[in-house]
Amino acid sequence: MGKRTRFRLVATAGAALVALAPAAYAATTTVSATSETIDRKPAGTNDADDPAFWVHPSDPAKSLVIGTVKEAGVDVYRPDGSLVQSVPIPSGSRYNNIEVIYDIDLGGVTRDLAVLSDRGTDKLHVFAINGSSATAPLSEVTASSAPLVFGGSRKINSKTAYGLAGWRNRATGKAEVFVTQENTTNLAKLVLTDAGGGKVSYQKVASLSLPDHFTLPNGTTWKPCFNPRHPDWVAHAEGMVVDPDTGTLWADQEIVGLWKMSTDLTNPVLVHKLTRFGQKYTVVNDRCKIDSSSPSYGEPYLPGDLEGIGLYRAGTTSNGYLLISNQQKSIFTVFSRNGSSYLGTLAIGGGAFDAVEATDGLDVINVNMGPKYPQGMLVTQDGKDAPEGGTNFKFTPWQSVANAMRLVVDTSGSPRR
């Protein structure tokens, strides 16, 4: 690799960047998964994509892992990996990211909801979660009148709803959902609304555009090489997560770095930058070729790209971790909960099941998820499931990760409160 230099950088669009002290790129720590889900064999885009947890209020073994499988719909699993329900998808839809939001009162009815982004239609889909059902815990409650997220009156092809995160705002009691727009730097904040008759809709209340180019210390302008075949496409964000204790929204811009901002979509700060940040590149056969000998203004511990992101809450507002998947390198980067410190690099290697590779979405939780995961679990999409050849989700005990990386185990607190 070329010389690594770090300076204070200047961003456009009112966003800030910070320069962090150099941190060593730690050796990768490897653990193994202890459960996996069914393989989604390659068939169109019927791929496992992004998972989310639903925690049962009294019986951890009855908790759920809910995963989008793109044009195959949604799969629902128990913590042991057994399939509970497969929800088919409407024609023209393509599900992407998912979030579970607890105790939302709409129309006088309080429900737990799973909210998904739909790349095919530029809409959200909302499902009510009935934990007492053994075979069909999800039922769709999206209003037919639900609007487009970004397209206004007409869907913009290839620039539809993409990444998604959400939470129950403790101050207002409302369900807030954050959505990114594919192939743009746009983010939108939506609030779920009562559409009557038990149905749920949403309305946009705020928006933000992250920078698509950056001014480097030498005075030059650097724009990430995203997709030369489509010069109007720019580096989008996908993975997002809300820290409910601090009101912080984390978003990873795939080939730029990790952003921190408020849930009002204000004060965005780029706190970690990819190794490729600021490096020169050429376009060869419509592909971006990075000149690794050119100066980097990024971090050596963030090679490749960024995809999924999860928050491990260790019972307080200060303890815990952010985990981010690097799809190109098949590794996971671990930061302190406030994003200030790089703590190490994780891989999920082979063992009882094959290694996890090319991960897109992930989620992590600190509470009891049943007999195999009494101290929490990490769920990761496996983009190269073997030997079947498709994709699936792998389940790893948090205890294994914590022991290997010398991290905290703290099962106190509940995502419901």
Image: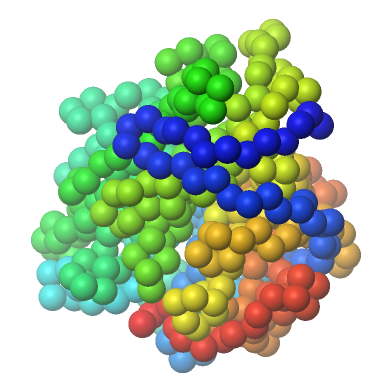
Relative to 138, does residue 284 appear above or below in the rendering?
above
**Is residue 358 shown to the viewer in this render?**
no
Give the mark count. Answer: 0
Is 216 left or right of 47, judged from the image as shown? left
Relative to 291, does residue 128 appear above or below in the rendering?
below
Residue at position x 18%, y 28% from top?
Answer: 153
Residue at position x 56%, y 22% from top?
Answer: 218
Residue 73, percent from left and from top: 48, 49
| View extreme (top): residue | 285
* 24, 153: nearer the viewer: 24
**Is residue 403 shown to the viewer in this render?**
yes
* 266, 72: nearer the viewer: 266
Q: Quadrant of residue 80?
A: bottom right
* The C terminus - image quarter: bottom left
Is 71 left or right of 104, judged from the image as shown? right
* 181, 333: nearer the viewer: 333
Residue 200, percent from left and from top: 21, 58
Relative to 416, does residue 141 appear above or below in the rendering?
above
| View extreme (bottom): residue | 58
Is 32 left or right of 362, judged from the image as shown? right
Residue at position x 77%, y 66% from top?
Answer: 33
Residue at position x 38%, y 73% from top?
Answer: 245
Q: How is the image coloured?
A: rainbow
Residue 232, percent from left and from top: 43, 15
* The N terminus - image quarter: top right
Q: Quadrant of residue 10?
A: top left
